[in-house]
Image (cartoon, rainbow, N blue to C red):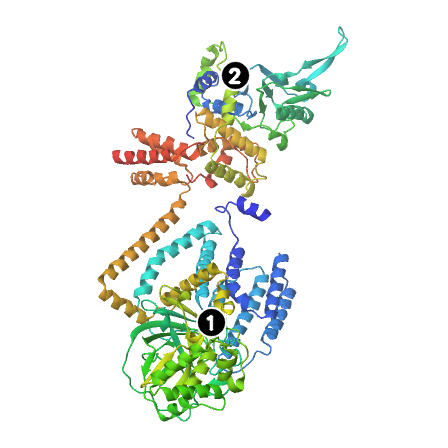
Amino acid sequence: MKFLALLQNTNWKLTRIFPLTLLDMAYITVLLPIFIMLKAPMMLFSLIVLVILFFKKSPASKKLIFFIFMLGSLAIYLSLYGAFSFSGLSRLKIFLELLIYVLIVVVSMQRLTREINLYLIVSPFLFLALSLFFYHGMLMLVYVVFEVFFLLWMILAHRMEGSLVESFRSSMLMFMYSLPWVVVLFIFFPRISFEHANYGFKGEVIKRMGHDGTMFIDGNALLVPSERIVMEVGFEGEIPAEDTLYFRGSILYVDKKDHWKPLPAYPKRETRVNRPLQGKVSNYKVTLYPTQKRWLYLLDMPKKEVKGSTLDRDLITRVDKNIKEPVHYLASSLLSHTFYDVLDEATYRASTLYYKDRNPQAYIVAQEIKNKYPLKEKRASAVVDFFKAQALTYTLQPDALDINRSTDSFLFDKRRGYCVHYASSFVTMARMTGIPSRIVTGYKSDKSESLDNYLVVKEKDAHAWAELYINSQWVRFETTTTARYIDMQNQLNSIQQENPTLQSINLYLMYVKYQVETWILYYSHARQLQLLDYAKKNPMFIVVFVLSLIVLLIITFVIIAYLRRPMYSSEALYILQPLLKSLKKRGYTRKKEESIHQFLLHYISDNPQHLEVKEIDILYEKILYASNTSKLELVLLKKLIKKSLATH
Amino acid sequence: MNYTISSEFTPIIDAVEMHLVGKRETIALSLATFFARGHLLLEDIPGVGKTTLAKCLSQVLGLDFGRIQFTSDMLPSDILGINYYNQKEGSFIFRKGPIFSPFLLADEINRSMPKTQSALLQAMEEGIVTIDAVSYELNKPFFIIGTQNPYEEIGTFPLPNSQLDRFMCSFGIGYPDRVSERDIIRGKTENISTLDQPLLTQAQIEAYMKKASLATLSDTLLDFLQNIIEFTRNSGRFEYGLSTRGALALTAMAKSWAMLQGRDYVIPDDLQMISSVVCSHRLVFKEGTTTTKRIHDEIFTHIFPDI
């Protein structure tokens, strides 16, 4: 409360801040992000220095500074002890960390002397630059802008002899003056196209994301009911229909009893075949967060490979290395549930292999279907019908299946499961009826987490479905739709909907973040060209663009005008300015120590014929100093001044 | 300094000026001090019209004029009054001292002993006199013009600063200008008849005093005022800064001065006008002599209204 009262009673206009305090404020700002990443010993050291600074107001003795030096060295040693690993980027990181630690110790030693020197003035900028290596992304961008502004403010405050209010206004003005230029240059200045400079250290903590390369049917391999974001997708145009939002990941062929595996890399298969394109084209850009996998997720069916990746014959978009940091890619897909393929030997063998002794019951049913229908599509729909007839339940908490006969166990005994169990059993049975088939894993999104053309795919959207080879085409089968019952209690949705408001706020925030990222952080040469192209096609766009630039300019100048206005300590003085200007033209300049009243009297005594000036003087004083003045008097003053200016 | 005395008050000043030729500003300032319910300390050499000013002012205002000539052997009872034993009635009767006049000229205060000085100053501050455990209220209005000889003379007891603070304003009268002095020498002022009746009634005086206290002080002006006060305290030019009583004196004087000019609000010019006379006996320069003009110049070359 005392502090609040102090704040209220302080006349900020007159308050002068000491240079050392200004410097401290700058340090607090730049050290904040660095402080968070400090290791415990270094943090302890910083706290000790802070305590000493707080309680010891006199310059530190040489002994104390030496002690701080020793303490700092110890803290550096302890912080970096055991962190030396001479591989990869981490060496650079250690080096930078060491640099920051040394800088902190040196600054502490210098600061304790309570004198300002060059080290202390330069170091905030070094800290600012160094912190950029350790952080990246939106928040840091905003913070860096703030830091730059703050440092500018502090420099100006120092130049203006510690006046916080005046220097704040000046630095705001500088920012406002530069704003239109920054915007225009940002949009039009030719950009060098390069891979996003993902500086900073990322992927330190390996996070398990989504399903693995293998799919377990006993454990909860695919069941990660988490809200963690897997990817953010921005569509060109509207988001496609929900039943097409299948993000294709990896494809599993090999039934290993308790889990499914992809085909081994050897023997090598033929490269993919040329196939006719079909389906609606959808273009979109994806931000995929670290998955530690070697493939990207694209909508069914990917049209062409994403830059820097290869599209294999199963339409898996493969990359060379595990994805350890966020990747951004532009993708194009043909929205379809089928694609044309010519099976090669290896694929055929892998996709038709089954073990009839493992699931005898299913085998009997499959043989019946096989014998009854010669056509593959009929057989497939018969399998679907059989699934439907089994009265299966979709649940996220199924009973454990008998792994030795998982399909039988699922279809005939337990009858409860989720996508994994459905897909696994379906593929097994399809193979038994003689249809080459496989499991596709990926993400199936719905539009509940979407806004405009922006879609968030979360961990809980992980999914598995089946693909059957019918009439030279791979056809997608959504196997979970065969469930007759849905165990609502165990639905993920029921958990999420606990707080829908919070959820939607969160989504909005993510949307804003995403928009800023795509339009500011990742604004590239390609995007510039895209914009130019768009402008060429739509002349209206140019008009809108120019108009919005003008609006921006106007807003900027309004803000500038607003910032400049309080330079006059009252509105009346502001209104008086034209008169003062006109008097200046006539050779009457107000002396610094003269009040307006004295100045005007001085003018009147030289020019007694200007009676309006006397009126203005009286009214002006009244407005400023009398008790009950209204807006009306300001208007009157304006009028009087206008009149007076008109007469001479 | 520019100022225009309102037509309400010009007759008063004119009337006094007939006796004290060419000293309109001094008269106006004295009047302002009176309306601000303050007391006035005149510091000047003998023979420039201190007594004339006091006498004329009391006549114009219609207040009973009392006068004490301070000497080194004076006792407090000479000022306050005394309980004397009336033999006829066989009881103690209080005889009022000169302090019970509403308009008192205390001539050459620094000639008396500190004991006597403090008796006067206490009465000035509190408006109450206590004699033998009985309190007597002083007249209202109560106005003292004290005079002090500025030069060191044998047998003077300079007033301590704490006591000087009780006077609202302090200034000198100064020599008259050449033309005015010629008129005085010619004897023009002697022929002027004294006023038949005062120009103001008691009720009017009370009304003016109230009006002066009600003048508006805007926030802008308070900033200016406080800047002045802070300057006297923090600039390092003065031995010590203005006290809060000094600040109150500044305010009251500025309000009163604003009223004299027919305004019900104070403007910076008022403060500029009265600051030096309010401060001259309150501030002492660390270096060099302290004069009214120097105080004015020092303050207002550093602190000025930016509007």
Q: Nearer the viewer, residue A389 or A9?
A: A389
Asked whether the residues under the numbered discs 2 and 1 touch, taking CB atoms below 8 Å apart as contact, a structural biologist would say no
According to the image, label 2 marks what residue?
A: B203
In the depicted structure, whether residue B32 falls above or below residue A520: above
Please provide percent x and percent y for residue A100. 53, 70
Q: Which SS class for mark 2?
A: helix
- Amino acid identity at mark 2: Ala
Please provide percent x and percent y for residue A561. 35, 48
To which chain does the residue with label 2 belong? Answer: B
**CA distance separating discs 2 and 1:** 100 Å
Q: Residues within 10 Å of mark 1 (few under 14, many from 20)?
A: few
Image-quadrant location for residue A610: top left
- The structure residue drawn at horizontal position 58% and vertical position 23%, both measured from the top left corner, is B147
Determine the residue located farthest toward the top in the rendered image.
Answer: B88
Q: Residues within 10 Å of mark 2 (few under 14, many from 20)?
A: few
According to the image, label 1 marks what residue?
A: A485
In the depicted structure, whether residue A16 falls above or below residue B217: below
To which chain does the residue with label 1 belong? Answer: A
Please provide percent x and percent y for residue A248. 39, 78
Q: Which dot marks residue A269?
A: none
Asked if labels 2 and 1 share a chain, the reply is no
Q: Which SS class for mark 1?
A: strand
- Amino acid identity at mark 1: Tyr
